[in-house]
Amino acid sequence: MHCYDRQGNEIDMFTAAMKLPKYRRVLGDHIIGYWISTVWLGIDHGWGDRPMIFETMIWGPSDKILNYQDRYSTEVAARLGHVEAIAWVRANFSLERHHARHHSRSKSRSPRPPA
């Protein structure tokens, strides 16, 4: 198992573990009810000749993980991938759809009793 810092330099596992808490988050954005997260993994998650040490995932409403995951070997590629993930959410989950889903759900619920 190989570990790398955010610049792609190989490091030992202890050093990677010590960096995790403050070093991990690359980018994070809430877009129309979806959380797009890009993180440094530290451990190579790739099978090829370049270490895949960054990952972008998208969580939907109610913390549902969408079928969207991408991995990158550099921080620059990860940042660009994060922007692409935001564009993907905007293209596939419009604000109108988000509001329509929320409205239809709230209408189908029985009213809450007064506090």
Image: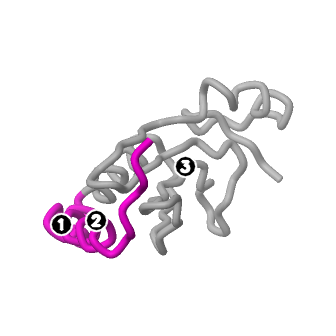
Answer with mark 1 or mark 2, whichever residue precedes in sequence. Answer: 1
Q: Amino acid at mark 2?
A: His
Check contact, mark 1 vs mark 2: CB within 8 A.
no
Name of the residue lying farthest toward the left:
96
Q: Nearer the viewer, residue 39 or 33?
A: 33
- Asked whether 41 falls inside the magenta stretch, the response is no
**Which color scheme is applied?**
one colour
Answer with mark 3 or mark 2, whichever residue precedes in sequence. Answer: 3
Q: Which stretch appears magenta? A: 87-115
SS of the residue under disc 2 = helix
Q: Residue at x 77, y 25 (%)?
A: 18
Q: Nearer the viewer, mark 1 or mark 2?
A: 2
SS of the residue under disc 1 = loop
Q: Residue at x 60, y 34 (%)?
A: 24
Q: Amino acid at mark 3?
A: Phe
Q: Tell me if mark 2 has few (under 14), some (14-19) or many (20+) residues whose alpha carbon lies within 10 angstroms of its own.
A: few
- Residue 54 circle label: 3
The rendered magenta stretch, by its main secondary structure, is classed as helix
Q: Tell me if mark 1 has few (under 14), some (14-19) or many (20+) residues whose alpha carbon lies within 10 angstroms of its own.
A: few
Q: Amino acid at mark 1?
A: Ser
Q: Nearer the viewer, residue 110 or 93?
A: 110
Left or right for 32, reference 7: left
Q: Position of residue 3 (x, y in %)?
A: 74, 43
Which residue in the protein does label 1 denote? Answer: 94
Q: Position of residue 73 (x, y in %)?
A: 52, 51
Which residue in the protein does label 2 denote? Answer: 102
Answer with mark 1 or mark 3, whichever residue precedes in sequence. Answer: 3
Could you tell me how far apart the alpha carbons at marks 3 and 2 are, in whole angstroms? 33 Å
Say which quadrant the C terminus sits in. top left
Q: Residue at x 75, y 33 (%)?
A: 16
Check contact, mark 3 vs mark 2: CB within 8 A.
no
Q: Quadrant of residue 110?
A: bottom left
